Image (cartoon, rainbow, N blue to C red):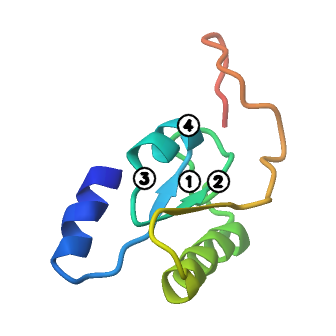
Amino acid sequence: MGLVCRVVEAAGITTVCISTGRDLTAQVKPPRSLFVNFPMGNAFGKPFDRDMQLHVLRSALSLAENATEPGVLVDLPDVWPEPFEFNPGRSNM
């Protein structure tokens, strides 16, 4: 996704990549990235958690407005409320 952000930025449109893979995002270096330490596929939080989803969205919009340097990667300090290690025998939601 970070590479897509670069192309869109080149067209003059501001982007923010919301990422759950910090190491890969740091390598790709999109113009602006917000790292959320949530399980893959849940970048905005748990389903139906409207408050968390709005919080992530507002954080991303704030980064779009206030980032002062290219390639910035900001860590959202929020923590997923339960362990999310992969366990093939049970749902991780």
Residue at the (79%, 58%) spot, across then down: 78
Q: Mark 1 points at which residue?
A: 43
- Residue found farthest to the bottom: 65
Disc 1 and disc 3 in contact, CB within 8 angstroms: no
Give the residue type at disc 4.
Asp
On residue 29, the disc is 3
Marks 4/1: CA–CA distance: 15 Å
Marks 2/4: CA–CA distance: 12 Å
Task: Give the mark nearest the N terminus, 1 or 3.
Answer: 3
- Judge from the rendering whether residue 1 lies leftward or rightward of residue 42; answer left or right: left
82 w.r.t. 48: above or below: above
Q: How crowded is mark 4: few (under 14 residues within 10 Å), some or many (20 or more)?
A: few
Q: Residues within 10 Å of mark 1 (few under 14, many from 20)?
A: some
- Label 3 secondary element: loop
Out of 91 and 29, give the one closest to the viewer: 29
Can you tell which of label 1 and label 2 is closer to the viewer?
A: 2
Q: Mark 4 points at which residue?
A: 23
- Label 4 secondary element: helix
39 w.r.t. 1: above or below: above
Give the residue type at disc 1.
Ala
Task: Give the mark nearest the N terminus, 2 or 4.
Answer: 4
Task: Give the mark nearest the N terminus, 2 or 3.
Answer: 3
72 w.r.t. 45: above or below: below
Marks 2/3: CA–CA distance: 16 Å
Can see residue 41?
A: yes
Q: Residues within 10 Å of mark 2 (few under 14, many from 20)?
A: many
Please state the horizontal and vertical placement of residue 13, each as a whole percent of the image.
26, 82
Disc 1 and disc 2 in contact, CB within 8 angstroms: yes
Q: Mark 2 points at which residue?
A: 36
